[in-house]
Structures are given as C-alpha cells and as structure tokens.
C-alpha cells in the first residue's frame, strides 16, 4: 500500500473490495466513514477530492483502521463516537452502540412528554428515568430536545456510567441529570417519574450466537442477553415501574422483533397500567411499547395502538443514520 501512489478514489475502491472479501456487511460505507475520519473531513470531501494523493501518515492511520474493522471492531468503536438524534455520543467497548431504531423510542418519549406539558396534565419541569442508560443517548437526547426536563439514569456498569457522564458534560447537560450505578430500578426507590424509559437487553440467550460478530464479540454481553426468552428485564420493569410513575405518566420500552405483543401483555397485567401503545420502527417492525398509568383525558384522542402510517409520518425526518 505504501509503495504506490494511492489517491482517495483508489484507496476507497481497494478497501471496499478488501472488506467484501472479509465479509464486512457495509464495505463501501465503512471504507468511506473511516477514511473521512482519518482525513478529518466530511464524506462529501472524498468525492470532491477523488484524485488527490494521500500522505504516508494518512495511509498509515487508515491502515490501522482497516485492520481493526476486518477484526469486526464496530466502526463506532474505531471512531470512538456515534451520531444519534443529530447529536454526537462517545462510545466505548463498555457501551452498546446507539442504533437508529432507538430513535423511535426517543421521539415517542419527546412527543408524549411535550404533550403532557402542553395539556397541563404534567408539571412544567418533567422528571424522567432512563434504565440501562449505556452512553446516555436516550435520556440526553430527550433533555436536549425538551427544555426543563430533568433525568435520573441507572446502569449496572460503572464504566458505562462514566461514558454517559462524559457525554452529559460534552452536551452541556450535566446539571440536568443524575447518574446512578445499580440494578434496574433499585437505586431510584422512593422516587416518581413522568416517564420511565428503557432499551433493556432483549436478545434471547439462544440467539446470541447468531448475532453479527461486531455485536456478539465486541459489545457487552450484559447489554444484549435478555435471558431464555429475551423478556427477563421486561418482566421486572412491568412489575415494579408502574408504581414509580406519576398519575398520567408512562413507560416507554424498546423491544426486539416479535416481542411487542408479549411486552404489552406484561405491562397490562399490572393493574396500574390502563392503556398501551405499540409503535413501529422505520421498517414497519413493532419496536416500542408505551404503557400509561391513567393517560390524561386531553391526550385520549391519540390512537391506543398504531399500525404504521400515522406514527411513521409523525417520526419522519428523525433518523440520522
């Protein structure tokens, strides 16, 4: 690679082909993202400078990125960051990489919290909880887009909590969020919230081995495995979280494929839950379950269960990836 003149276009084509040979899922995209990172430029720069020769130091740095990627290190871990909801979050091997599907959960929470404020059913400054916060992407995005909202977060991993705290600092939100290390709701006992949010581990244990190597080998197992049927954490949240909701508050939970109906049933089994919604992701797969504790009358006009088109139109334009 170093004994030839390598232009931007040439190195991109070579890397794309090499990634294909190694079974990388998005060879061209990954090649471009990594090269743009090395050059400290936007991806559009690569196409404007296709014939530009690369410096030896740039080639060396890019070679290191290529080596890591073919070892199935996620691109976000190589870059050390991931864009989510239009914001940039630090990521490490101690955290799950934020994914576009989780934007559905965030947008649903923002919309409903804003409606609570506007309807007068909730306090002007709403208090939310984020369980299993990881990078903090869920709660910090909500705080960014919903002024005045305060949050408490919980993660069982001290290392993940540290990453979330760094992200809060970087986004100028550290004064609006309190971080806890612990198991699910335990650190929050005695507190109540307008919304309790979670993207808990939901992969059935038997399915872990079938995950892509980037996920199975490089992301924390504790952030993936949801027990034998993938529903362990939902059972615990459905049992304990409703009692920690204020009247008129809601839980919003991201779920895996084919899990939405089961999770909604778990929520409905708690007598404090009076209504549930199921929201699809961008591919039309049921992705978020919202469970209300006495949904305010002023918000009853919204459908109890969305089958696709209205919610997808409402969420149009929120995906950043």
Image: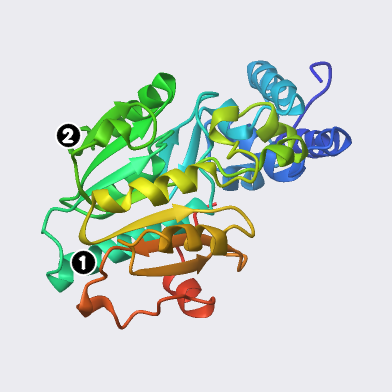
Q: Quadrant of residue 66?
A: top right
* Residue sitting at x 31%, y 83%: 301
Residue of label 2 = 175
How many residues crowd around disc 2 within 10 Å: few (fewer than 14), some, or many (20 or more)? Answer: few
- Image check: 218 left or right of 130? right
89 and 267: which is toward the camera: 267
Say which element carries label 1: helix
Q: Which mark is residue 89?
A: none
Q: Position of residue 244 (x, y in %)?
A: 25, 48
Circle number at residue 116: 1
Q: Residue furthest right?
A: 21
From this view, report whether residue 87 is shown above or below residue 223: below
Q: State the residue in front, 166 or 251.
A: 251
Q: Is residue 248 left or right of residue 17?
A: left
Q: Residue at x 79, y 17 (%)?
A: 2
* Mark closer to the chain start, 2 or 1: 1
């Amino acid at each position: 690679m170093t004994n030839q003149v390598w232009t931007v276009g040439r190195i991109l084509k070579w890397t794309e082909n090499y990634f294909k040979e190694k079974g990388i899922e998005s060879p061209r995209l990954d090649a471009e993202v990594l090269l743009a990172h090395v050059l400290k430029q936007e991806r559009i720069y690569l196409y404007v400078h296709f014939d530009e020769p690369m410096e030896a130091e740039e080639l060396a740095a890019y070679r290191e990125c290529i080596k890591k990627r073919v070892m199935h290190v996620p691109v976000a871990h190589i870059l050390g960051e991931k864009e989510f909801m239009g914001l940039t979050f630090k990521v490490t091997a101690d955290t799950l990489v934020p994914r576009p599907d989780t934007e559905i959960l965030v947008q649903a929470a923002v919309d409903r919290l804003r409606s609570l404020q506007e309807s007068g059913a909730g306090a002007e400054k709403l208090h939310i909880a984020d369980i299993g916060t990881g990078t903090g992407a869920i709660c910090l995005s909500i705080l960014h887009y919903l002024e005045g909202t305060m949050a408490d977060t919980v993660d069982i991993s001290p290392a993940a909590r540290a990453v979330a705290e760094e992200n809060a600092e970087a986004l100028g939100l550290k004064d609006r969020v309190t971080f806890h290390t612990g198991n699910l709701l335990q650190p929050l006992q005695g507190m109540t919230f307008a919304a309790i949010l979670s993207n808990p581990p939901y992969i059935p244990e038997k399915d872990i081995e079938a995950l892509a190597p980037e996920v199975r080998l490089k992301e924390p197992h504790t952030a993936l495995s949801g027990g034998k049927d993938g529903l362990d954490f939902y059972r615990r949240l459905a049992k304990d979280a409703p009692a920690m909701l204020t009247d008129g508050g809601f839980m919003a939970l991201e779920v895996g494929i084919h899990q939405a109906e089961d999770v909604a049933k778990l929520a409905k089994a708690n007598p404090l839950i009076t209504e549930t919604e199921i929201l699809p992701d961008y591919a039309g797969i049921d992705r978020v379950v919202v469970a209300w504790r006495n949904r305010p009358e002023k918000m009853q006009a919204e459908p109890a269960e969305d089958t696709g088109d209205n919610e997808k139109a409402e969420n149009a334009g929120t995906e950043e990836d």
